[in-house]
Amino acid sequence: MNILFLSHYFPPEGNAPASRVYEFSRRWAASGNEITVITSAPNVPGGVVYPGYRNRFVRENQDGIRVQRVWTYLAPNKGTARRILNYLSYMFSAFFAGLAGRRPDVVVATSPQFFCAWAGLLLAICRRRPFVLEIRDIWPESITAVEAMRNRAVLNVLEKMEKMLYRRADAIVTVGEGYRQRLIEKGVPPGKISVVANGVTMKPGAIGPSASSELRARWCPDASFVCIYAGTIGMACGLDVVLRAADLLRRRGRENIHFLLVGDGAHREELESRSRAMSLRGVIFTGLQKRSDVAAFLNMADACLVHLRKTDLFTTVFPSKLLDAAALKRPVILGVEGHAAQMVREADCGICIEPENAEQLADAVLKLAADPELCRRFGENGAAYANGHFNADRQAAEYMELLTRIVS
């Protein structure tokens, strides 16, 4: 089958949508399918093209995947106007790139971003092929949840565009049951929605212990316990809770417990500046790291933090970083309510806290730091659950079965 996949993000970018598209696409390509991914030059989150790449139309091959990179207006992952220009420029560039290529059997487009989905729909219409919409973020609801936009007139237009996407899609794929339920509440027929979760791709045995030891010696040489957050440091994450928890730990005489924030994003500079102003020795920022090094960072952790702001919309979210931590046998401190919390409790792989509650975060870290056996148990339970329920090969095959049915 010839599959055209539109994704605003793709490796070497290391965020969740890039990793999901890559992991599924390489498995489909290995099974004999022709996969073309239309994406932009890697530039997230700073809006600066990665070394070795150029912001222009160029083709490459990654593990059997045909990658078509298109020109976009580059913008950092913060602000509104420039980011909208970035999204719109991708939509137009991806649309024309898709018209120029070979006619696919099916068009798949993933969110984020919203306009990536529209490029996919327009291509499917012009090429007279079925359209599969993948929902990883419910726009524009997620925009209002983080207060990124308040213009009601613009939001009304976006909501109408959102509903049109749902109507015109031949099938909708979501990454979790929470999204499915939210889409049904919005009037999408249940039979149109399929859930294909992310698969586990990180394995403890594949990581050299020396790499993790070197990272720990470099970033947290004086720490007795390290809690890592790895991912985008953006508006949705609510990571100011880390600063407040670190301040509480300092007051309790536990500055030997460190929080290591691995990654970059719209709020990283602000949080780092506030941390310096508060003289928090227990909070360390690494900045943007290579995607290939993330597993080694997680492997050096004593615990992993997964956190989002406290809002009703995020109760539907199932963060992929939760699976990454569990698969590497790291105990999880989860500040996300809803379906993600249900999984942590069912798997018995960590401690659930109220989002944005610094006192509960500090207490959770202290509890784990005082009980290595509890950490070991959480880690073993998490790995068993993640590998049993989220096998990447099985998820990719399930997705391919769906695409085959739609094309047939």
Image: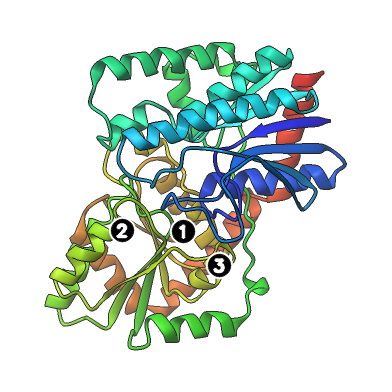
Residue at (53% x, 79% y) in the render: 212
Residue 295: mark in rendering: 3
* Tag in front: 2 or 1: 2
Find residue 268 and name its label.
Answer: 2
| Nearer the observer, 179 or 46 | 46
Q: Which numbered disc, 3 or 2, marks the residue closer to the eye?
A: 2
Query: In this picture, is 376 found above or below 166?
Result: below
Instruction: Please say if 93 is above or below 265.
Output: above
Residue at left offset 43%, top offset 49%: 47
- Asked if residue 46 lies left or right of residue 177, the reply is left
Q: Residues within 10 Å of mark 3 (few under 14, many from 20)?
A: many
Residue 400 to residue 191: above or below: below
> Which of pointers 3 and 2 lies earlier in the amino acid sequence?
2
Seen in the picture, residue 240 relative to 228 is either above or below; the reply is above
Disc 3 is placed on an element classified as helix
What residue does disc 1 label?
348
